[in-house]
Image (cartoon, rainbow, N blue to C red):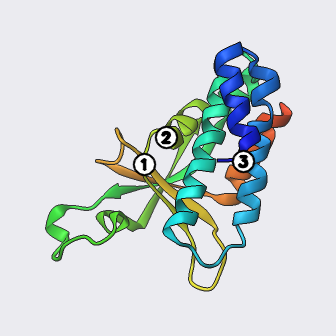
Amino acid sequence: MDGSLSNGILLALRDDKFPEALEKGPHTTRNKLQRRGGLKRWTASSTAALEKEVFLGAFAVRKLMDSGHVSHVASGKTHRIIFYRIRDPKEIEHKIKHFKHGYQLGRGNPTDLTLRKLMDQLVHSYHFSPFVPFGKGMVGIFFASDWTQKNRLYYFPLPKLAEVFRNVGTGKPAQTK
């Protein structure tokens, strides 16, 4: 865990210094996401590190929202994201080896989530996986919270996610539609 970010979150929780301690959270997450975007070889540890970074960034955004340090414009903004419905169990003939095989990835549907709902999905992710096409860097993230994983899987492009974190950290509304 990044020492400055984790110390900032601990200080914020202990001393109620949300703005000073958590302001760096979204910026740190955005910077790490941009660096990881070029990574072409993913291991279990790099995936776990990414999930932790996204979790901490989403947690920081939620705490900033809860403490009133995110504008109503930014917190009320909706973000267009793609979701995939769960597959009918009759369609699956063999044992599912990866959670993504259980969803209709060929048939994505757009939906809009508020900043709060997007951050809740990331904080409570039951499924989390970077999308890395063969021979390329990471282009997005598949995720589903523990309460939505039984009917849908979300996908959010990496540049849009990095922009959301950047805009929350700078106080600007995101332009992700």
Q: Is residue 83 visible?
A: yes
Q: CA distance from mark 1 to mark 3?
A: 19 Å
Q: Quadrant of residue 72?
A: top right
Q: Which residue is mark 2?
A: 121
Whole-number angstrom distance, CA of label 3 to CA of label 2: 16 Å
Given contact means CB atoms under 8 Å apart, are the residues at marks 3 and 2 in contact?
no
Q: Which residue shows up at 37% across the image and 50% down it?
A: 152
In percent of width and height, residue 170 lies at 85, 35
The residue that mark 3 highlights is 29
Q: Nearer the viewer, residue 75 or 42?
A: 42
Question: Which amino acid is tagged 1?
Answer: Ala
Q: Is residue 172 left or right of residue 1?
A: right
Q: Residue at x 68, y 73 (%)?
A: 39
Residue lying at 57% horizontally and 49% vertically, measured from the top left: 52
Q: Are marks 1 and 2 in contact (CB under 8 Å)?
A: yes
Rounded to the nearest angstrom, the CA distance separating label 1 from label 2 is: 6 Å
Indicate which disc, 1 or 3, sits on the residue closer to the N terminus.
Answer: 3
- Which one is in front, 66 or 14? 14
- The amino acid at mark 2 is Gln
**Which residue in the protein does label 1 denote?**
144
| Crowd band around label 1 with a 10 angstrom C-alpha radius: few (<14), some (14–19), many (20+) | many
